[in-house]
Amino acid sequence: MNGFKMSMLNIFRYRKRSMITASAIAFGVLFSIIMEGILIGSNTDTERNLRDYETGEGKLYASGYFKERSMLPLDFFIERKDRDAIETNAKDIPITSRTNLSSELYFNEDFFPVAGSVTSVLTAVDPAKDARVFRTALKVDSGRWLKAGDTGVVIGSWLAEDIGAKIGYVVTVECRGRGSFYQTFDAEIIGIVKTDDPVVNRNSVFIDQVYADSLLALGGAVTEYTFRSSESGARLDALGAKIADGTGVEFYNWKKVAEEVMKLLNGKQSNGGIFLFFIFIIAAVGITNTMLMAVMERKSELGMLRALGFDKAYIRTLFLMEGFGIGLLGTAAGLILGCAVNLFLVRYGIDFSGLFRDLDIGYRLTGVIRSTWDFKSIMQTAIGALVISTVVAWFPSGKILKDEVADILRK
Amino acid sequence: MITIANVKKTYETGALKVEALRGVSLEIGKGEFLALAGPSGSGKTTLLNLIGCLDSITSGEITITGTPIASLDQVKRNLMRQKNIGFIFQSYNLIPVLTARENVALALQLFKGLKDREIDERAMDMLREVGLEGLENRRPMDMSGGQQQRVSIARALVKKPPVILADEPTANLDSHTGEEILGLMEKLNEDHETTFIFSTHDQMVMDHARRIVRLHDGEIISEVRR
């Protein structure tokens, strides 16, 4: 007969109480697996969508543009000469140029249910090269993607829904050209794209770069170059520098370009950690309470064990093993349930389209959030739950073990 | 065997001081079957606890098999209990999740050098001796009060201590079962030459005792030998 067996039997002696406490731990582990999986999954998908639809692996901007980029300024252009150098440097690397402008999209009752206007981002793209870098061209929901020489526009699906746009409808685009003159032009909607990036869907208007150049007097200049690569970290930065070599342009990797989003993602993961911390605190309180009740109810047994000659360390170990046992039950149940639920969430996800459609919470996700398998965090959660369950069982036995055996038996 | 010399025990609760023992002196020889008798609050359980190293002595000295215990630290008191003293409690204090055999074997677990098989055999022998053969795999809740007290006696005796201390051993039993238990303890006392010291206010127990020490308000007021 060993202490381990006695501790395990004691767990089932107070079956309901042990099961309730184990359930609290199981809930903590389950929630932790799901939360971590969803947070990491959301972050991974957001990062992927950022690269697929907004940043590529990195961008080249004219000097001074980066700081002002959120304002879409028309004061910093990559001129023809630098463009040639960049394209020569890039050789076989998938690269494309774009020009982003702030614009106002007007729609009237000739085509649309109601008249009005909406602020949008007008992006002049190179139809031939854009699909080498961005996935936008692959996400046409109706109509078609741009071709060289097109005078129409392609708009985001949520924007189309908001204004009631359909293929063939004509909108009026108002924006500034190079030198800050105002330009207004009518354009037929030739395509609607439904991407995985809410920013693109919500307010993007795409136009052929050659047509934009003639309308806005860009003189062959663009505001940015974007490229794709399998490189990352220092090798990516070196590649960007190589492409920018001999020009006045500056390279920024995708994390730098989307630094605000990255901060948001990291912040959300930290908040998730705090939330999980509180869940484990609840589980710890549960274990402490269970152990405290066990100590109170078993005073005569504890006194008897001390009377037989068992020392404090042995008795304390019995409680630690009991806490460990309850923790093991809860952790095992939490792992099984957590993995089962996570399997569903990895395969099917949760549809948050209603939320993302109306609310911009920073994630570059449009509908279904999928979880992911992060075995490191699952292991950390399981080990954390076991350690907490064991450690918190230390304290309840402390008070009573300080007493004389006669006092324990008398109580 | 056991020498108790002018032992005092005072309990302090805040400003309140209660003198549970006021200078008790007693000599107890090997193989005695002794009852500490007296009403509630007379100090009999306190004296039993002090002899059993379960509580600290305020002043005076108790010597058990030549070892003075008043100044022993917790670890040495633990060892003293482990090797020299067996306990029988009024409410048996068995571990409910363990079988009768496991409860008895528990007392041998601390003895280094004993193999599991040997522990098991000694526990079984002891259960046989207290008349519980066939019930060794029952848990306490599946046994009567008398049977539970027999397990408790087996647990106290299995490590062959020179002294057994029994605090009101028949208080939770009906008179018939109480008689049986006392008869069993008398037999074990004779067979093993183990010293039995009871605390009791039960006349039936006193009738079986060969020496009765009466306490009142923490002092010995009389002593009878038979």
Image (cartoon, coloured by chain):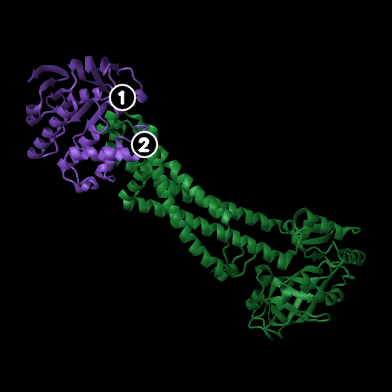
B190 left or right, relative to B9: left
Provide residue B15's location: percent of width, then percent of height: 27, 21
Q: Which residue is mark 1?
A: B80
Question: Which colour denotes chain B?
Answer: purple
Q: Amino acid at mark 1?
A: Met
* Circles 2 and 1 on the same subunit: no
- In the picture, the disc for residue A315 is 2
Instruction: Decide which of A92, A45 is in the foreground and name it.
Output: A92
**Image quarter for residue A242?**
bottom right
Residue A61 shows in this picture: yes
Vertical comparison of A396 with A160: above or below: above
**A46 up-or-down from B141: above or below:** below
Q: Residues within 10 Å of mark 2 (few under 14, many from 20)?
A: some
> How far, Cα to Cα, is label 2 from label 1?
18 Å
Query: Is residue A295 visible in the rendered structure shown here?
Result: no
From the viewer's side, name the closer residue of B45 and A38. B45
- The reply to whether callout 2 and callout 1 are in contact (CB within 8 Å) is no
* Letter of the green chain: A
Q: Nearer the viewer, residue B217 or B47?
A: B47
* Snapshot quadrant of residue A294: top left
Can you give x and y, in whole percent of width and height, for residue B211 in the image?
A: 11, 21
For badge 2, the amino acid type reads Ile
